[in-house]
Image (tube, rainbow, N blue to C red):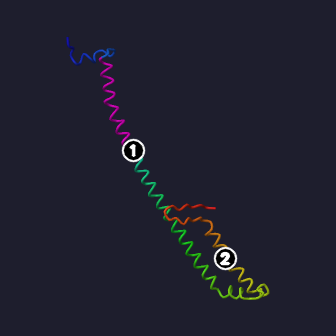
């Protein structure tokens, strides 16, 4: 004999109630788990994309700063190479005897040394696709 549908719920200890309870639990939890997994995948992909964009922007900023430093170094080096004080100092047979010229030349060389140390603090690779950057 067939029982009426509400009689399955009348007894909470019967095997039919346990089957219905397991089926209802599965129907409730499986969609939630699937939606949670999809949300996790979408969010993690979005975060990875945003981090990649931020890293690219940082690398571009570092590259621009390095290029600016190198241009400055090139300008200062050319100015000092064409400096008449340095040329005069190098053309003298005994440059250490002219104290004034020696002092000016020494200050020029010190300023060049500071700039060179500043640029040397960045290690550049010739490969433009992969640019390792190390700070000393």
In primary-sequence order, the first of circles 1 and 2 is 1
Q: Which mark is residue 30?
A: none
**In the displayed image of the protein, which residue is found farthest to the right?**
97
Task: Identify residue for label 1.
Answer: 41
Quick check: 122 above or below 82?
above
Q: What secondary structure characterizes most of the magenta part?
A: helix
Which residue is rendered at x = 38% and y = 40% of the image?
37
Residue toward you, 9 or 87 = 87
Determine whether label 1 and label 2 are within 8 Å by CB.
Answer: no
Q: Which quarter shows the C terminus? A: bottom right
Marks 1 and 2 sit apart, C-alpha to C-alpha, by 55 Å
Residue toward you, 27 or 8 = 27
Quick check: 72 above or below 25?
below
Crowd tier of the residue under label 1, counting other residues whose Cα lies within 10 Å: few below 14, some 14–19, many 20 or above: few
- Kindly state the secondary structure of the residue where label 2 is placed: helix
Which residue is rendered at x = 33% and y = 28% of the image?
26
* Residue 118 is one of the magenta-drawn residues: no
Q: Horizontally, is 51 left or right of 115 in the view? A: left
Q: Position of residue 14 (x, y in %)?
A: 32, 14
In terms of image quadrants, where is residue 21?
top left
Give, as a single range, the part of the protein colored magenta: 16-38
Crowd tier of the residue under label 2, counting other residues whose Cα lies within 10 Å: few below 14, some 14–19, many 20 or above: few
Q: Horizontally, is 129 left or right of 99 in the view? A: left
- Kindly state the secondary structure of the residue where label 1 is placed: helix
* Residue 30 is one of the magenta-drawn residues: yes
**In the displayed image of the protein, which residue is found farthest to the top?**
1
In terms of image quadrants, where is residue 113?
bottom right
Task: Identify residue for label 2.
Answer: 111
Q: Horizontally, is 10 left or right of 65 in the view? A: left
Residue toward you, 127 or 9 = 127
Quick check: 17 above or below 59?
above
Q: Position of residue 43 (x, y in %)?
A: 40, 47
């Amino acid at each position: 004999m067939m029982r009426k549908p509400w009689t399955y719920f009348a007894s909470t200890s019967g095997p039919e109630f346990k089957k219905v309870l397991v089926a209802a639990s599965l129907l409730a939890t499986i969609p939630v788990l699937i939606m949670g997994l999809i949300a996790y995948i979408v969010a993690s992909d979005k975060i990875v994309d945003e981090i990649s964009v931020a890293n690219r922007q940082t690398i571009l900023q570092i590259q621009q700063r390095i290029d600016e430093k190198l241009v400055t170094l090139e300008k200062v080096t050319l100015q000092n190479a064409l400096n008449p004080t340095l040329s005069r100092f190098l053309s003298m047979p005994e440059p250490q005897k002219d104290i004034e010229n020696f002092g000016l030349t020494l200050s020029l060389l010190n300023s060049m040394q500071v700039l060179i140390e500043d640029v040397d603090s960045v290690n550049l690779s010739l490969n433009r696709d992969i640019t390792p950057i190390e700070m000393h």
